[in-house]
Image: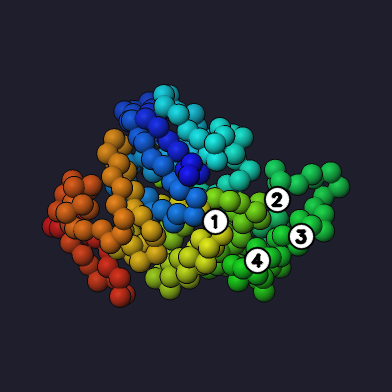
Amino acid sequence: MKPIIELTEVSFAYDIGPPALEHVSLAVAEGEFLGLVGPNGGGKSTLLKIVLGLLNPASGEVRVAGETPQAARIMIGYVPQYARFARDFPISVEETVLLGRLGTTRLLGGYGMADREVARRAMAETEVLELRRRPLGTLSGGQVQRVLVARALACDPRILILDEPTANIDLRGETEIFDLLKLLNRRMTIVVVSHDIGFISRYVTRVACLNRTLLCHQPVPIGLEVIERLYGMPVQRIPHGDACAMERKP
Ligand code: ADP
Ligand code: MG
């Protein structure tokens, strides 16, 4: 079967600084739940933006469902890293989720019944329906992330891509998000960036490790040696609920 996401020998550099990605090859099969991990600055967000067609590789090839990333953009729901917004910007949960319909719907005359129905379903699935009239700025971090997942679902995607969706939320919020992703994985391919390799190992079907050049693929569970090779430093497991996280050894 053709992979749904396929990168072949992809390299990329920003205008300044060293290359962010060098000769990265990765194939994601339809239905996978892939965790993308690696050190800060390892190129994870850059890789996702290339898959989304927001950045073009300097060399190499990218195919999403057999098409260019730009052509396939409509199939992908995206939750960006640090989705910052002005806390006092007067937008409600429902309006935020409806933004996910942009690019899918014709906006002449505003959102239609079908748009509102898709948004309602997305909010129900992410359990934010009761919050729909609330201004986004009044929600907790975990609630905001669920709203952003609902927005990503509102384009009815085949692939869901999330960039550190749980970076600033507590373990309970993190567990809720990943339980939700597990359910969504029944009908869509998921790629999620996370720092917390121990935590995500309980959920994902495979971990890909990215450090600019090195990309190793590893079915879970993932061993300490692999993590140390990836991070280039000794690491230890630290208690983290019933899961574990990795921390640099002093
Ligand atoms: P990660 O998401 O793994 O932390 P990024 O993809 O954000 O890594 O960044 C990879 C490298 O590219 C880093 O060295 C970072 O400093 C650099 N970089 C990221 N965004 C830009 C940008 N807009 N302009 C210049 N350099 C950037
Ligand atoms: Mg990043």
Residue for point 70% across, 50% down = 101
Q: Position of residue 141 (x, y in %)?
A: 50, 65
Badge 4 element: helix
Q: Earlier in the sequence, mark 4 or mark 1?
A: 4
Q: Position of residue 237 (x, y in %)?
A: 21, 65
Mark linked to residue 101: 2
**Disc 1 residue type?**
Met
Whether residue 39 is visible to the viewer of this picture, yes or no, is yes
Residue matched to label 1: 188
Badge 3 element: helix
Residue 218 relative to residue 223: left or right: right
Q: Nearer the viewer, mark 4 or mark 1?
A: 1
Q: Position of residue 166 (x, y in %)?
A: 44, 61
Q: Earlier in the sequence, mark 1 or mark 2?
A: 2
Does mark 4's beta carbon lie closer than 8 Å to ligand 2?
no
> Counting other residues with Cα less than 10 Å from the Cα at mark 1, is it few (<14), some (14-19), or many (20 or more)?
many
- What distance separates the C-alpha of mark 3 from that of mark 1? 22 Å
- What distance separates the C-alpha of mark 1 from that of mark 2? 18 Å
Q: Position of residue 250 (x, y in %)?
A: 13, 57
> Counting other residues with Cα less than 10 Å from the Cα at mark 4, is it few (<14), some (14-19), or many (20 or more)?
many
Q: Earlier in the sequence, mark 4 or mark 3?
A: 3
Does mark 3's beta carbon lie closer than 8 Å to ligand 2?
no
**Disc 2 residue type?**
Arg
**Disc 4 residue type?**
Met
Depth check, front residue: 137 or 79: 79
Residue matched to label 4: 123
> Counting other residues with Cα less than 10 Å from the Cα at mark 2, is it few (<14), some (14-19), or many (20 or more)?
many
Residue matched to label 3: 116
Residue for point 31% across, 59% down = 220
Badge 2 element: helix
Residue for point 35% across, 35% down = 24
